[in-house]
Image (tube, rainbow, N blue to C red):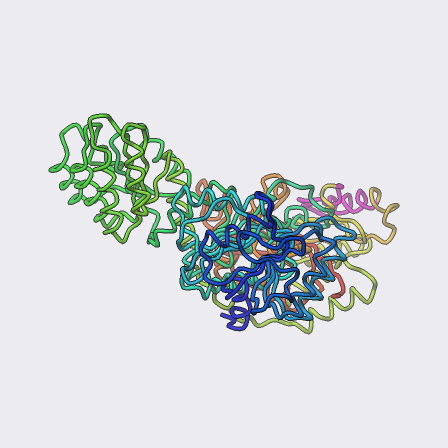
Amino acid sequence: MNKTAHKSLDALFRPRSVSVIGASRKRFQIGHEIVRNLVLGGFQGPVYPVNPKADVVHSMHCYAKVSAIPGPVDLAVITVPAALVLQAVRDCGRKGVKGLVVITAGFSEIGGEGEERQRQLLKLCEKYNMRMVGPNCMGILNTDNAVSMNASFAASTPTQGGAAFLSQSGALGEAILTDARQLGIGVSMFASVGNRADVSPSDLLEYWEGDANTKQILMYLEAFGEPERFMRVARRIAPKKPILVVKSGRSPRGARAAISHTGSLAGSEAAMDSLFNQCGVLRVDTMKDLFALAAAVQTGKRPQGRRVGIITNAGGPAILATDACVAHGLELPDLEPSTRRKLKRALPPEASDANPVDLIASADAKRFDAAIGAVLADKNIDLALAIFVSPVMIDAAAVARTFAKHAAQSSKPLLACLLGKSQGEEAAEILLNAGVPNYRFPEEAAFALAGMVRLQELRTRQVEAPPRFRVQRAKARKVVDGALADGRNLLKGLELQELLVAYGIPVVPGRIVNNREEALQAARKLKFPLVAKVEAAGLVHKSDRGGVVVGIRDREELLDAYDDLELKFGEEYPHMQLLLQSMRSSGVETFFGAATDPQFGRMLAFGLGGIHVEIFKDVVFRLHPLCRTDAEEMVHGIRAKSMLEGARGKPPVEQEQLVEILLRLSRMLSDFPEIVELDLNPFLAGWKGKGSCVLDARVRLEKPK
């Protein structure tokens, strides 16, 4: 942890005194509500209202400006109109204030004049060594009893607890605090960061890393900055403190113009998902999902596998839970014979001792107690869900207390799902007070179970350095520099072959020919059958244009193919050449690629290849550079992985070879920042690794800026 960065945010989250600039005497004005929240929240220090037009606010003496306050001021919360903010900040700087929360809007979010105002605001912060949250935000809070600071205009005061929240949306921040309280999610700190002009998500991650009260970190992000720093910091923190993120903006957008399949498939969403995955952060789609999972994570229990045990008193909800668990990739294993014997002794004959364990409607607290204990003790079970539909004749509160007992005693996660309103409110309150996650529907509980498992997998994923490969970097450098010196940003046929071979990536044998006679000479070296491809500057996706002829079996077919391609392309591309390659077909067509995202930089891709890559889009992305775990997740992460394992009687391909090629490509990208797009499509993954090779490739270059 960066101790200097941690200390620099103490003025914001652990101030000894707070001034509210723009404090108002009128109820429901922002300046009034912030002073009110500070006072009613029990802030452990003096609060100084600032308003030149008021003598008293909230029964406290009001000052005309910050510099008129007699004592020191650590934090200033600014709510004055945008035109007055710079003047107020300048006065804070002269006073020695070290922390600012600028609530006021009217900065970069409105463009033009607002952007210039924000630049001036940052200059003043730098000049006076002040850290700032905002502008255009809702405020911050810290529930630590030694601070008890609510420097926000939120209507709801959260319950003290272990979740630190970051929200980029002020309006959503209000909902976050309200829902957290209702769902029993305790809050350690909260920050509405607004425009993120100074304090960023990465800053807050580092700060919360060192906060003993913070056990998990929850974020709502609309825009993203500092991806490299975020990855570095989050990767360090995630194994110790779970990080959950809702990142808005998943809606599809048009693929940008690109010469590669990778470029058209990739986008900032793929890069964002890759970044979160690679640094151990779990991204969820909605705020509802965030809260559902946060409640489960708050227990501190970490499942050691995907095997779920379900205990229920009603068959229908158990079926729903089972279907949802399986859909999320969880497993419902058979229980151990010894467990089933225990259950048979404790259950009536009509009950089921299989997983899910159905205790039938007459199940009371005693029956649930025996069943939950047996299931949680089973070595085949990693986590459990207890479902209770509340019939009128059963003491629901006693059942809830049984759930709470086992949740407290077991090291395995236990989630609850209470259905029905008969006596249900009292039971739900018992679970809430005991810190047992309780879900309204079985599907929500299944999502939370799956999220806990996925989060554990992310937090324990290995991040090791990739192996070192012997490569011919000088040879590859000659190819790249030569193309750029010629004013070309696309490599040509044999250049591609030389680049790839220099990095140990097998390429199908090929020759460039300029006329019919050279074609015949090349055929004698390469042997039939052959593939002929047009090579011409500016011609991409040549198969879509009819620029590829496959299955050339003899001399006559070769000459016919040459003549046909020359007739079709010769006029448009007078300097066209032909690339002749040996024809290979024994294996699975796969796809390797690289593309550059303007915000996140370069990323690599792997998936099924050939002409269907953009149709099926069965592609996995990871940000460059790759570690070995990244490459393995890419190869094992495609939906059609069974094709690599040997589908329909075919032998398997060598998946380790595919992992190695990804790592070699990552090394190539590290050595050559000039490579901004790359496609190896198809790469023929030969059966059992034999005969694997690149059949077609594209590489686009740009001079580094």
Kindly tell me whether residue 359 is visible in this rendering.
Answer: yes
Residue 302 point in image, percent of width and height: 34, 54
Indicate whether residue 555 is drawn in magenta: yes
Q: Is residue 506 visible?
A: no
The quadrant in which residue 359 appears is: top left
Q: x, y (%) of residue 692?
A: 56, 56
Q: Of 672 and 368, which appears nearest the observer? A: 368
Task: Note whether 120 is above or below 451 in the view shown.
Answer: below
Question: Residue reaching furthest left?
Answer: 345
Q: Is 286 or 629 nearer to us in this picture?
A: 286
- Find residue 543 and report its horizontal and vertical position in percent: 71, 43
In the image shown, does 207 or 416 lie closer to the viewer?
Answer: 207
- Furthest toward the front, the residue is 55
Q: Quadrant of the C terminus?
A: bottom right
Q: How many marks?
A: 0
Q: Where residue 572 appears, x then y in whole percent?
A: 87, 46
Question: Is 338 on the left-hand or right-hand side of 36?
Answer: left
Q: Quadrant of residue 275?
A: bottom right
Q: Residue furthest top?
A: 392
Q: Give, as a single range, the part of the protein colored magenta.
A: 545-566
Residue 349 location, quadrant: top left
Image point 23% across, 51% down: which residue?
Answer: 409
Foreground residue among 154 and 188: 154
**Is-magenta flag for residue 80?**
no
